[in-house]
Image (spheres, rainbow, N blue to C red):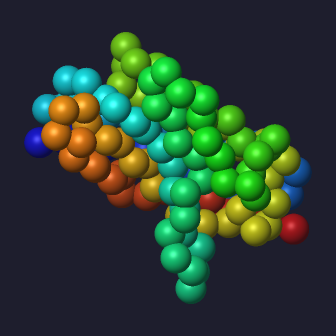
Amino acid sequence: QVQLVESGGGLVQAGGSLRLSCAASGRIFSINAMGWYRQAPGKQRELVARIRSGYIPNYADSVKGRFTISRDNAKNTVYLQMNSLKPEDTAVYYCNVQRSGDLTIYWGQGTQVTVSS
C-alpha cells in the first residue's frame, strides 16, 4: 500500500505565497514522476506542475513564473512553491505520484488553497 500525505494549504491574500508538500510512503521504493493537479469548483482537474528525474519540469501556462515544483528523492517528497497567488488559483490541490516499474499512479487526499482578493 502507498500513502500520500499532503500539507501546506490554507487561506492567503492575493499576492501572497504558500508552499505545498506531499510525502509518499509505503510500497513505493522508486518514483518515476511526481506532480500537482488542482480542481476548482465546477471545473475539471488540471495539471499544475510535474517533475520527472532527468527532465525539465513542466508547468501549466497559468502558473509559469509564479510556481516552482521540486522534489527530495531521499524523502520521497514533492513540493510546490506558489508565489504571487491570484484568486483564480483557488482550488483543491492534489498530489500525484507515479511509481517506477509498473507506473501505477497514486493520488493524495487533496488540500484546499483559497486566495482572497
How far across and how far down the image is residue 9, in percent? 58, 50
The residue lying at 35 percent from left, 42 percent from top is: 97
Residue at image x 60%, y 29%? Answer: 56
The answer to which quarter of the image holds residue 47 is: bottom right
Query: Which quarter of the rendered picture does the C terminus lie within?
Result: bottom right
Q: Position of residue 37 (x, y in %)?
A: 51, 56
Give the left or right position of residue 80, taking residue 73 as reference: right
Q: Is residue 8 left or right of residue 86?
A: left
Return the residue found at the far bottom. 42
Q: Position of residue 49 (x, y in %)?
A: 58, 46
Q: Name the residue at 65% across, 46% down.
A: 59
Q: Is residue 31 visible?
A: yes
Q: Is residue 3 visible?
A: no
| Residue 85 located left or right of residue 71 | right
- Is 69 placed left or right of 16 in the picture? left
**Which quarter of the figure is the N terminus placed in?**
top left
Q: Is residue 32 above or below residue 6?
A: above
- The image shows residue 71, relative to residue 9, as above or below, that is above
Q: Is residue 73 above or below residue 105?
A: above
